[in-house]
Image: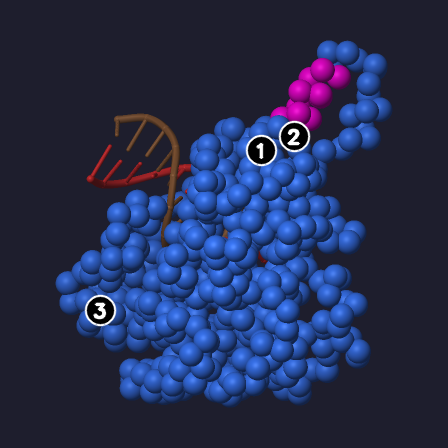
Chain colours: A blue, B brown, C red
Amino acid sequence: MPQLNGGGGDDLGANDEMISFKDEGEQEEKISENLSAERDLADVKSSLVNESETNQNSSSDSEAERRPPPRSETFRDKTRESLEEAAKRQDGGLFKSPPYPGYPFIMIPDLTSPYLPNGSLSPTARTYLQMKWPLLDVNHGSLQSRQALKDARSPSPAHIVGPFCLEFPGQSDLSLHQFQLSNKVPVVQHPHHVHPLTPLITYSNEHFTPGNPPPHLQGDVDPKTGIPRPPQHPDISPYYPLSPGSVGQLPHPLGWLVPQQGQPVYPITTGGFRHPYPTALTVNASMQSFLSSRFPHHMVPPHHSLHQTGIPHPAIVTPNVKQESSHSDIGLNSSKHQDSKKEDEKKKQPHIKKPLNAFMLYMKEMRAKVVAECTLKESAAINQILGRRWHALTREEQAKYYELARKERQLHMQLYPGWSARDNYAGNQQGKKKKRKRDKQPGEGNDLSAPKKCRARFGLDQQNNWCGPCRCKYPKEVSCLVRA
DNA sequence: TCCCCTTTGAAGCGC
DNA sequence: GCGCTTCAAAGGGGA
């Protein structure tokens, strides 16, 4: 049973996580799934590319047919080996070995006690925090440290970026080591897109690392011309646009902590918020308070300054309320006003979003990469690719995300003890229209579990062994990737 | 402007 | 316990 944390009684972790891996014929199935998934992905992308690239590359037709047979695991293993070796080299003994291969998440043995007796952060915790939030001034000279780390890093394998959505064996492994390198989200993502719990999904120390962009980003190739694109702004690198004066203009990885100029800083509401969030303006000073929100209260000395300026966690989305209109209506109709006031109050109730699950974290991490590799921008198609890649991940690779998701849930639970997913159900949301899921015919749309089972079990080459619904379903599934 | 699409996983709910 | 539904992110597309 691939129970995380050794099944150490953590009821937050989903017990059924990755159950699919433990079916009979696990290895064969996994390999088969990897191969078939890669093939699926290639097919998917082929169709997608054919759809979107027809005008750009007329010779890309039937790419799937011309594709060489699925690569053997050997190449993948070799890639992983080289990457692991590279990871070892870059480790430099600074960090504790992660529990999972290729798991860049810095594991702190005892985060519940990140303080030294003198009250300062322990080096381990400092490292942890520095890794989590690179811009956090945990210690001085962090930039140099990161630079040193960067310099010590082995060159990453070439990462081809082009007009086609290519799949490479071991690409997921690549991703593990290039997480932040390949993820432009923390850099270019609009603040409101930064997940409140983003700190938990920052895996590496390579955010904002000044200097040369990683190969695959460096090679930001114009999909149409194949020519590397110049930075969008002549003076500012699109990926490392940080200058001392421009730092504040960027979405901070602590976007939910640091108020962005000109950005709403999650307006403070007095009601319904049990855990006012630490003020961004006192990030360093309030570290203990920040920690207090994450760790048992008795372990962190009280700090009152945050409380008054608490900035709501960005998971809290305060619905836009038309203040002006509500005020201008005052006196026109008392009952109407009362109703609208009531409604406004309800609307003002912060919306605490669900913590992201493992796949969501993975999507957040990999979306930019997939978008960069493909010319696709439609999220539905991107998500299908990501879904297939997700299944192509190894157990260890997925475990990393499950672990992160578990931590997210844990943190979320600590931040909002009384919160329930039910609170976000449309029935409880005033003014929010209920999302209606499309009525699906049997065997249509989301019902992918069966096809996946047959695909995983027999592979694409043995479709004759698939059950009827799967055989009927699969071509449709692929064809539906590109909505005409 | 709002909702749909599309993915997986977590959680809630009804039976 | 099982099955269904909703929501989380994302952004193009359609009504």
Write down the residue under mark 1: A273
| Secondary structure type for disc 2 | loop
What residue is rendered at 69% in x and 40% in y? A309
What residue is rendered at 75% in x and 72% in y? A243
Task: Tell me the amino acid under the disc marked 2.
Answer: Thr
Q: Which residues are magenta?
A: A337-348
Viewer-side label of 2, 3: 2
| Circle 2 crowding by C-alpha within 10 Å: few under 14, some 14–19, many from 20 | few
CB under 8 Å between discs 2 and 3: no
Tell me how far mark 2 sits from mark 3, CA to CA.
Answer: 53 Å
The residue marked by circle 3 belongs to what chain? A
Percent position of residue A76, x then y:
34, 82
Q: Are marks 1 and 2 on the same chain?
A: yes
Write down the residue under mark 2: A270
Viewer-side label of 1, 3: 1
| Circle 3 crowding by C-alpha within 10 Å: few under 14, some 14–19, many from 20 | many
> Compared with residue A431, is residue A375 higher up or lower down, i.e. above or below?
below
What residue is rendered at 36% in x and 75% in y? A39
